[in-house]
């Protein structure tokens, strides 16, 4: 008999199991508790904290607690979306780790009977001079492109950042967005006793056993030996599964659908029973197996990919089996929904495990956080460099600022023919076929800000994601998140965790954007280093009429360029201070939520009333980089003259928040100023659009003078050069 400690269970947790069962658990039951009570499945460190998030709103059909969140977009349609992590698997097996991350998040979407229409990824890697970082980077990007391209779901947006803190723990966060008819949404609640439990999709193998537990521990040198905990994906099987499940999901006799992800049959069966206040009985000998002589322990804990659980009305089994036969997939009745509240596992008719279903899903002992406040020194004393043009070129070539075209060109971002705004913009935009509507999607997080101040950094992540949607003309309608942190048993990390949750909650409440789904990934550390707190925000926005779409590129020579929003030149920590001077301290930019909200409202109004020709959010690299990006995207230049500036470097590269640069024709200027006055938002004319040159003056002093062709060359090719060095 294995010790409970070998299963990663604490003494307190084992005592709770004895209390629940009134007996000693057997090895299979211990394994089931181990995966379901792991951090990855149970959220035992974060359940109380996550209650701070606003999760309801006029559009919310389904908030957290389901496979994915569901938000109403009108005309009988809903958008379904969720973000998850596959960090630990990607650290030891980058290709399969990233590929199966894509497979898993896609299943969360079509489990709700929604067709997946877009993928996004938020990736973090270590120092690109490190050969292992290049290996992980190449493997992860290849895994995402392979799986996404094969299943025919476009990868339309995302982000890639590099920092030494991710040397040992890369972060692979993936988001999927789907569209469904409101009346066709399916949930994972098995509420009718006597219903059949049908396992569909791929056969079950030994891959991925204890993957959930593996994802809930620190990475060490032993992690390499846990490669069997990384599942193996088959995207062609997943494509068939998408089509078969969407066809079956249209039938009224399909009562519930649940993805088999982390913890496999153990989680899928316990969750559908628990949510419906029912029990479930399955016989493992009825599970299609692709390997011989699998034990009950292996079958019930396998995390083999491309499998789903369907709960079906009695008498409809044959109809379901015919659909899956047509798609050349397994569909095997493995059990029934019962009234007794127990999860009963049999093998050839003999009971091998029996646990109350709710014990696995709801009764994990919550871990109380022991947090200790800590901060970083506010040290930003340095002289302004003499040659600001050289600094500009360096920042433009910085791997955290330059174009990620080298990555996203490996993804198919046009499949499905819905992608209107391609990767590389503030947000990607997808049309909703058969309507005037479109959705905008983005992922955002500046983890450097979160390291310096987790509360302000998390607030900033929500605001920047919202700004990225607003500048396209989209109203933000929902958030999904992925909270990536190190070991929460460390009081400093517990403090970070509490603060990032509070920051997201406060910003989401103030901006009235509900959090409808999400994921927590903890223990992202090694004996050498801990990751920065990285609360990635995925956000979806609605454009009611695609003709209102706005893009970031400048459109016409002689158009005015106006800085809308915050007019202060704040001397805060930013990519300029970090990258040019190597200073990893200071205070990050602070977001004024009232100003941020007014900025969103004003920008959306200017777009809807067709006043402005372009809009672009200011983020990493500040004003100079934002201007360069709008020039590159529009293939036009600028002449700008900034006035009353004290520190020229922070005017160019500082990252004060709540700022958008817009361009408009001279004829629309009067209408523009009228709206800005009504909305009481600061706005400053800073220059005009020209043909080829890129010129920035400060108090009449020319500090940058180059051409759009030159900045294009640096911006587009720097990442490729860094990777191939």
Image (spheres, grey):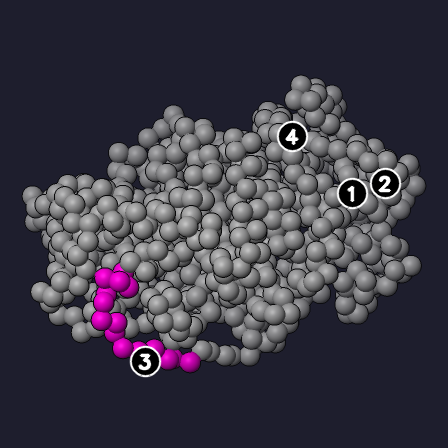
Viewer-proximal residue, 104 or 334? Answer: 104
Name the N-terminal-most of marks 4 and 3.
4
Magenta range:
377-392
Q: Is residue 505 above or below residue 538?
A: below
Instruction: Return the residue at label 1.
Output: 206
Residue neighbourhood size for the residue with mark 3, other residues' Cα within 10 Å, grouped as few (<14), some (14–19), many (≥20): few
Observer-side mark, 4 or 3, equals 3
Viewer-proximal residue, 532 or 698? Answer: 698
Name the N-terminal-most of marks 3 and 2.
2
- In the image, farthest residue toward the front: 725
Across the whole image, how many numbered discs are drawn on residues? Answer: 4
Real-space Cα distance between discs 3 and 2? Answer: 64 Å
Instruction: Return the residue at label 3.
Output: 381
> For this view, does 512 lie left or right of residue 370?
left
Real-space Cα distance between discs 4 and 3? Answer: 57 Å
Badge 2 marks a residue whose secondary structure is loop
In the rendered structure, are the residues bearing label 4 and label 3 in contact, judged by CB atoms less than 8 Å apart?
no
């Amino acid at each position: 008999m294995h010790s409970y400690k070998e299963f990663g269970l604490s003494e307190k947790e084992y005592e709770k199991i004895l209390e629940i069962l009134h007996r000693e658990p057997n090895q299979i039951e211990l394994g089931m508790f181990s995966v379901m009570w792991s951090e990855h499945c149970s959220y035992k460190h974060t359940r109380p904290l996550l209650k701070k998030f606003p999760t309801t709103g006029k559009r919310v059909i389904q908030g957290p607690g389901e496979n994915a969140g569901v938000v109403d977009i009108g005309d009988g349609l809903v958008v379904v979306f969720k973000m998850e992590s596959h960090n630990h698997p990607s650290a030891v097996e980058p290709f399969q780790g990233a590929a199966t991350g894509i497979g898993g998040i896609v299943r969360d979407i079509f489990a709700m009977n929604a067709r997946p229409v877009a993928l996004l990824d938020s990736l973090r890697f270590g120092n690109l001079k490190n050969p292992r970082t290049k290996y992980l980077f190449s493997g992860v990007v290849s895994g995402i492109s392979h799986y996404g391209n094969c299943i025919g779901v476009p990868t339309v947006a995302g982000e890639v950042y590099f920092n030494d803190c991710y040397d040992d723990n890369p972060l692979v966060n993936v988001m999927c967005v789907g569209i469904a008819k409101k009346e066709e949404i399916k949930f994972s609640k098995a509420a009718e006793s006597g219903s059949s439990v049908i396992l569909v999709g791929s056969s079950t193998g030994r891959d991925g056993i204890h993957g959930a537990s593996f994802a809930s521990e620190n990475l060490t040198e032993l992690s390499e030996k846990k490669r069997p905990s990384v599942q193996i994906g088959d995207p062609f099987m997943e494509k068939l599964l998408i089509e078969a499940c969407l066809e079956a999901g249209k039938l009224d006799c399909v009562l519930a659908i649940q993805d088999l992800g982390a913890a496999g049959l153990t989680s899928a069966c316990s969750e559908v029973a628990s949510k419906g206040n029912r029990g479930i009985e399955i016989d493992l000998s009825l599970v299609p197996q692709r390997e011989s002589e699998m034990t009950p322990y292996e079958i019930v804990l396998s995390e083999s990919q491309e499998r789903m659980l369907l709960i079906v009305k009695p008498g409809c089994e044959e109809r379901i089996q015919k659909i899956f036969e047509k798609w050349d997939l397994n569909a095997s009745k493995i059990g029934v929904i019962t009234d007794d509240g127990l999860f009963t596992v049999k093998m050839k008719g003999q009971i091998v495990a029996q646990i109350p279903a709710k014990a696995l899903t709801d009764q994990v002992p919550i871990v109380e956080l022991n947090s200790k406040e800590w901060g970083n020194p506010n040290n930003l004393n340095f002289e302004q460099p003499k040659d600001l043009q050289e600094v500009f070129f360096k920042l433009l070539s910085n791997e955290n600022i330059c174009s990620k075209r080298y990555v996203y060109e490996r993804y198919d971002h046009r499949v499905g023919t819905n992608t209107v705004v391609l990767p590389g913009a503030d947000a990607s935009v997808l049309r909703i076929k058969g309507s005037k509507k479109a959705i905008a999607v983005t992922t955002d997080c500046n983890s450097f800000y979160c390291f310096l101040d987790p509360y302000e950094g998390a607030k900033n992540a929500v605001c920047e994601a919202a700004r990225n949607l607003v500048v396209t003309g989209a109203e933000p309608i929902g958030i999904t998140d992925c909270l990536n942190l190190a070991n929460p048993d460390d009081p400093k990390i517990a403090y970070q965790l509490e603060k990032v949750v509070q920051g997201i909650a406060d910003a989401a409440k103030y901006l009235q954007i509900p959090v409808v789904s999400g994921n927590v990934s903890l223990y992202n550390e090694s004996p050498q280093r801990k990751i920065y707190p990285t609360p990635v925000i995925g956000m979806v926005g609605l454009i009611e009429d695609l003709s209102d779409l706005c893009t970031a590129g400048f459109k016409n020579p002689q158009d005015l360029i106006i800085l809308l929003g915050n007019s202060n030149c704040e001397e805060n920590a930013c990519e300029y201070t970090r990258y040019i001077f190597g200073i990893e301290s200071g205070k990050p930019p602070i977001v004024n939520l009232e100003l941020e909200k007014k900025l969103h409202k004003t920008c959306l109004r200017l777009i809807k009333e067709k006043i402005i020709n372009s809009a672009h959010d200011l983020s990493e690299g500040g004003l100079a980089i934002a201007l360069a990006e709008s020039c590159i995207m529009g293939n036009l230049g600028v002449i700008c003259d900034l006035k009353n500036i004290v520190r020229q470097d922070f005017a160019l590269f500082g990252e004060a928040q709540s700022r958008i640069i817009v361009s408009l024709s001279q004829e629309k200027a009067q209408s523009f100023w009228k709206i800005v006055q009504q909305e009481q938002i600061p706005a400053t004319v800073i220059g005009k659009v020209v043909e080829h040159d890129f010129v920035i003056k400060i108090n009449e002093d020319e500090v940058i003078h180059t051409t759009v062709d030159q900045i294009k060359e640096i911006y587009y090719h720097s990442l490729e050069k860094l990777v191939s060095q």
